[in-house]
Image (spheres, rainbow, N blue to C red):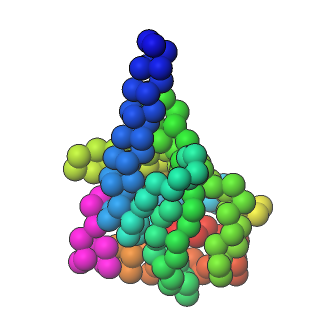
């Protein structure tokens, strides 16, 4: 009986944290910088707009509805992404994820939630190009989201499909 109670409590705790994570990520923007391995210079600006995030029935799977604005690519699309837990830390995991108009990506992005502004950090790979990414997770507001996305697009090189750079 103790094992059943503990197992049920553990399952309830996992469901609760998954629901809290999806709610936390919905209506946010990841605003930060990324680097490209082997290229000198300052990190480039990036912004990812997460309109919604929901936990799917499959283990570790979440549906993100995200706006990607990068170079001449500006699209909103659903992406089913795996989030695994390293202890209490969620890690967004992309394994050969194809993004229309941009190509195939691999990434590991660690999430540190926070009440005012959390943080993210990780690595990315796109073909022969890869690097690091880091920044803050901020609640989405109409003005700040549009401005940050516009600024990120203006400060970024052309889309990955043209020059092997990174998508955001």
Instruction: Place residue 114 in its image quadrant.
Output: top left
Viewer can see residue 156: no
> What residue is shown at x 25% (from left), y 77% (from top)?
142
Residue 39: x %, y % from top left: 64, 60
Above or below — where is 115 with respect to 165?
above
In this rendering, position of residue 99 left or right of residue 28: right
Toward the bottom, the furthest residue is: 72
Span of residues in magenta: 138-147
Q: Total number of numbered labels?
A: 0
Q: Is residue 54 visible?
A: yes
Q: Give left or right: position of 75 versus 17.
A: right
Q: Specify the quadrant that holds the N terminus.
A: top left
Q: Position of residue 161 (x, y in %)?
A: 70, 78
* Residue furthest to the front: 1
Quarter holding residue 141: bottom left
Q: Is residue 85 above or below residue 154?
A: above
Residue occupying the point 47% across, 20% down? 4
Overall secondary structure of the magenta stretch?
helix
| Residue under the image location 45 percent in, 75 percent down | 67
Residue 42: x %, y % from top left: 50, 60
Expressed as whole percent of the image width and height from the top left, the position of residue 149 reads: 39, 76
Image height check: is 159 above or below 14?
below
Q: At 31% from the left edge and 78% from the top edge, which residue is drawn?
A: 147
Residue most extreme to the right: 128
Residue 141 falls inside the magenta stretch: yes
40 on left or right of 146: right
Q: Is residue 4 left or right of residue 139?
A: right
Magenta-span inclusion, residue 10: no
């Amino acid at each position: 009986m103790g094992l059943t109670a503990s197992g049920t409590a553990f399952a309830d705790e996992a469901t609760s944290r998954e629901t809290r994570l999806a709610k936390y990520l919905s209506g946010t923007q990841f605003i930060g910088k990324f680097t490209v391995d082997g290229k000198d210079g300052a990190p480039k600006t990036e912004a990812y707009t997460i309109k919604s995030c929901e936990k799917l029935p499959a283990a570790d799977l979440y549906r993100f509805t995200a706006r990607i604005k990068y170079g001449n690519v500006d699209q909103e699309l659903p992406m089913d992404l795996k989030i695994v837990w390293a202890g209490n830390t969620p890690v967004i995991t992309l394994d050969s994820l194809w993004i229309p108009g941009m190509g195939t990506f691999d990434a590991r992005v660690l999430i540190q939630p926070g009440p005012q502004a959390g943080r993210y950090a990780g690595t990315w790979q796109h073909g022969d190009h890869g690097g690091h990414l880091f920044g803050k997770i901020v609640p989405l507001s109409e003005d700040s989201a549009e401005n940050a996305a516009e600024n990120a697009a203006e400060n970024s090189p052309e889309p990955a499909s043209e020059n092997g750079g990174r998508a955001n």
